[in-house]
Image (cartoon, rainbow, N blue to C red):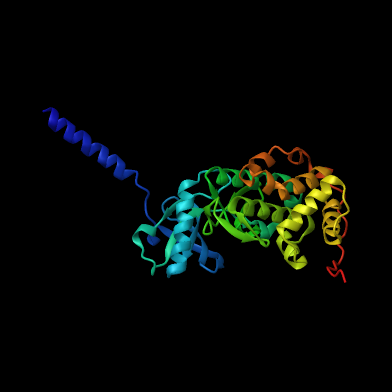
């Protein structure tokens, strides 16, 4: 009798476990509304689940080894991450696909990426709030010993109505300690992410990608470290850095400049903890009114000869 009872109990638990397995993606369960993006590895569409009428984003990776690897990295990362500032994965069909099939991921839907709305007035007034949320997401990713590897304005999703921010596109995600060449020096993934946050900060405040500015000036991380040391110690700066510093000084508060320099210097203090530490910076307690009055942008000339 006891054996029969135990058998039924085991069958019940197996049923419960099977019931709560993630449901794989089925094309027939969704209605495609429109295509909203495309890239090297595939497309992104806006879809609606027929049963619930809920809207999601569908990421379709191109068939082939590269698309499959990119999809696998993204899915593996999203399974390890659960944070309000990181886009959530609903389901995928990776397990049923080979590397020669298109892989699909159903994701939480957000209306815009940061690149599309950067010049909207409400975005400009909430730069600190947006940067703070980006850093929250980065700090969480780093706490899981991962680095995003591709933090750009197109991979930051935003809802202008709520100012909710979510990091997406984890196809280049990797272990945080993995080294790579960045700005002319071998550095780990954590610091690469921090430099990408600096890039976004420059994009917010001076309208240029900081990395583009760096490459156009042809200087390295080592020179940036010298720039930071010089600024802390009141030493005369290289003319290229003077221009950058003046650009930033004209559009962001003193606390903003301080955060900018601390992020640049973070390689010496450990970039793994930098994102979490930066969240406490007084820059984020200020309002946008603390920034200097915005001037009409001048035509920049990046020639020093």
x 76%, y 49%: residue: 260
Q: Is residue 168 visible?
A: yes
Q: Nearer the viewer, residue 95 or 52?
A: 95
Q: Is residue 121 visible?
A: no
x 79%, y 49%: residue: 229
Viewed as shown, does residue 158 lie left or right of 34?
right
Viewed as shown, does residue 143 lie left or right of 13?
right
**In the picture shown, does residue 136 fall above or below 66?**
above
**Whole-percent x, y for residue 20 in the image:** 34, 43
**Whole-percent x, y for residue 204 in the image:** 74, 54
Quadrant into which the C terminus falls: bottom right
x 62%, y 43%: residue: 136
Q: Quadrant of residue 133?
A: top right
**Whole-percent x, y for residue 110 in the image:** 58, 53
Q: Nearer the viewer, residue 281 or 57?
A: 281
Q: Nearer the viewer, residue 147 or 98?
A: 147
Viewed as shown, does residue 209 lie left or right of 142?
right
Q: How many marks?
A: 0
Q: Nearer the viewer, residue 194 or 299?
A: 194
**Whole-percent x, y for residue 139 in the image:** 60, 44
**In the picture shown, does residue 134 fall above or below 186?**
above
């Amino acid at each position: 009798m006891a054996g029969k009872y135990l058998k039924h109990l085991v069958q019940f638990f197996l049923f419960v476990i099977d019931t709560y397995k993630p449901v794989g993606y089925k094309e027939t369960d969704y209605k495609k509304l429109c295509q909203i993006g495309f890239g090297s590895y595939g497309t992104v569409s806006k879809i609606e689940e027929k049963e619930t009428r809920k809207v999601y984003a569908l990421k379709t990776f191109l068939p082939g080894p590269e698309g499959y690897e990119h999809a696998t990295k993204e899915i593996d990362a999203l399974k390890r991450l659960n944070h309000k500032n990181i886009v959530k994965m609903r389901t995928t069909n990776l397990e049923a696909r080979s590397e020669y099939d298109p892989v699909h991921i159903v994701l939480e839907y957000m209306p815009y990426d940061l690149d599309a709305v950067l010049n909207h007035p409400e975005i400009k007034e909430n730069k600190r709030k947006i940067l703070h949320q980006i850093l929250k997401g980065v700090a969480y990713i780093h706490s899981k010993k991962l680095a995003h590897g591709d933090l750009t304005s197109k991979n930051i999703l935003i809802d202008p109505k709520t100012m909710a921010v979510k990091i997406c596109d984890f196809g280049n995600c990797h272990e945080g300690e993995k080294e790579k060449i960045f700005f002319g020096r071998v550095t780990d993934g954590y610091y690469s992410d921090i430099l990408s946050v600096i890039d976004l900060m420059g994009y917010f405040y001076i309208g240029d990608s900081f990395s583009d500015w760096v490459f156009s000036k042809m200087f390295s991380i080592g020179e940036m470290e010298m720039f930071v040391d010089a600024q802390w110690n009141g030493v005369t700066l290289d003319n290229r850095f003077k221009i950058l510093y003046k650009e930033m000084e004209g559009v962001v508060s003193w606390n903003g400049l301080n955060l900018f320099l601390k992020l640049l210097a973070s390689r010496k203090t450990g970039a793994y903890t930098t994102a979490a530490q930066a969240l406490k910076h007084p820059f984020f307690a200020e309002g946008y009114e603390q920034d200097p009055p915005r001037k009409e942008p001048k035509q920049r000339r990046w020639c020093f000869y």
